[in-house]
Image: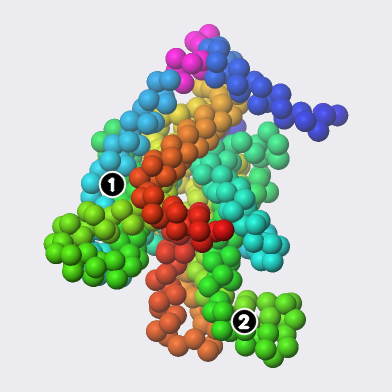
Amino acid sequence: MTPLVGQVEIRDRSEGGGCVAENGAFCFDWAVDNFDRYVTPILEHLVLVTASVAAGFALAFALALLSHRRRWLVPPLIAGTGILYTIPSVAFFVLLLPITGRGTITAIIALTAYNLQIIYRNIVAGLANVPAGSRDAGRGMGMTPGQLLRRVELPLAVPEVVAGVRIATVSTVAIATLAFLAGAGGLGEQIYSQLDFKTNIVLAGGLCIVMAIAFDLLLQLAQRLLTPWEPAQIRRRHAAGADDVLAAPA
Amino acid sequence: MTPPVGFLGAFGDAVEFIFNPQATRFTGGREVGGLDQVWDLTVTHLEVSGVALGIALVLALPLGVVLGHAGRGEAFAISVGNSVRGVPELALIAFVAAFIGFGFGNVAIALMVLGVAPILTNSYVGVRQVDRDAVEAARGMGMGDLQIITRIELPLAVPTIMTGVRTGAINIIATASIAPLAGVLTLGDFILARNVYGDDGVLAGAILIALLAMTVEFSLAGLQRWLTPRGIKLARERAAA
């Protein structure tokens, strides 16, 4: 099986003519002619990122709500998700193999574990940074704790929450290149399949970076739509503070 | 039907691989694994990561601190940190291997980039966050810029700076796992050369890399506690109480 794949690769590469034979830095013609072989990896990559960020967000959100009225839960949850975050992705993908088997689900589990820490931290920080005055005003209007959360605290926390999701998404696009170790394909599989072919590395790596930027812009737009009351200046400050929030010592 | 804890056997075999050299069906009688090889790969892993982190510290820490002290270059310091996060590790190492060449030095420089970003951003933010009143008080006592940096800003910024160093170290150690693709044999070799080490070796590599990362993380967390001035710790405890 493997030698056959090798033969196919060699034949395909010789089609590009001189540039490919010389392994030039970037063979534009080859890239245009062979772009179709990058479509499936792109889609696989998109699925990995979208599914794991969505799962990470849902979990982090649930944990944040759980610990919102039980502050003592925050330190152990940060420490627990932090340990998951410390395990290098290379190792994480492989460690799951005997338990969940090879495949997309395994990769999504590992990627979700990474998002969890980043997003959870930012939701907690966002809720904690809600001005006491806004809370008091809400209570003064007769809001119950649930109403206060839904109508005052969560909306005001949106910028930090989105900042966390942005960091998580951009990181996940990068880390998902290693999902091939769990047999989940993606652009990393494409890079790994032809490691000595420069055009392939530039193209597949470039597609990852473009995907990360696209996700980032999309999420920025989402934040603007979710917080129409925020003037641009404050928004910039929040965006700049993104690292600040992540950098806050545990 | 396999029992629900069947995977424990796989982990048992992986641990066996770590401690005892064995001939797998892939190696044609040659023995692989065992503590000697584990030790060799661990040393290389730590060497290449250590050199990368060292260079990153020398470059990024002074720059971040000086920028933070002067209050300049915020956009630069923050955006460097944010943009490097989007660089795919696999593409980075593959790029080094294909364009720059194999070898320890090339890999170390590529890994360094991953360390520079969080250290630069966090030293900038850490110094910037220092209470301006404390800085003014120091100035009023007659301290110069250098004294303010070394005696006021740096100690107060230790927790944030160390968070950046830890993030950088973890990024570097994680990415050093795929350094064998560029000819530097780290613990990741067990994972990437599955046709040599077999599934036991792959899993053993993952266990070792996870342990290595956690050991480094806990050591640096300890270092952070040791470096943090007592005043900050007391203030934290009071705030928590």
Q: Which corner quadrant of the image does residue A226 belong to?
A: bottom right
Stretch of the chain drawn in magenta: B26-38
Residue A213 magenta-drawn?
A: no
> In this image, A11 relative to A155: left or right?
left
Q: Which residue is mark 1?
A: B56
- Do dots 2 and 1 share one subunit? no
Kindly give the residue lying farthest to the top in the view shown: B29
Note whether A248 is above or below B116 in the view shown: below
Q: Residues within 10 Å of mark 1 (few under 14, many from 20)?
A: many
Residue nearer the viewer, A177 or B170: B170
Using the numbered discs, state the Cα–Cα distance from disc 2 to disc 1 in whole angstroms: 43 Å
Residue nearer the viewer, A187 or B113: B113
Q: Which residue is mark 2?
A: A135
Q: Amino acid at mark 2?
A: Arg
Question: What is the chain letter for disc 1?
Answer: B
> In this image, A63 relative to B181: left or right?
right
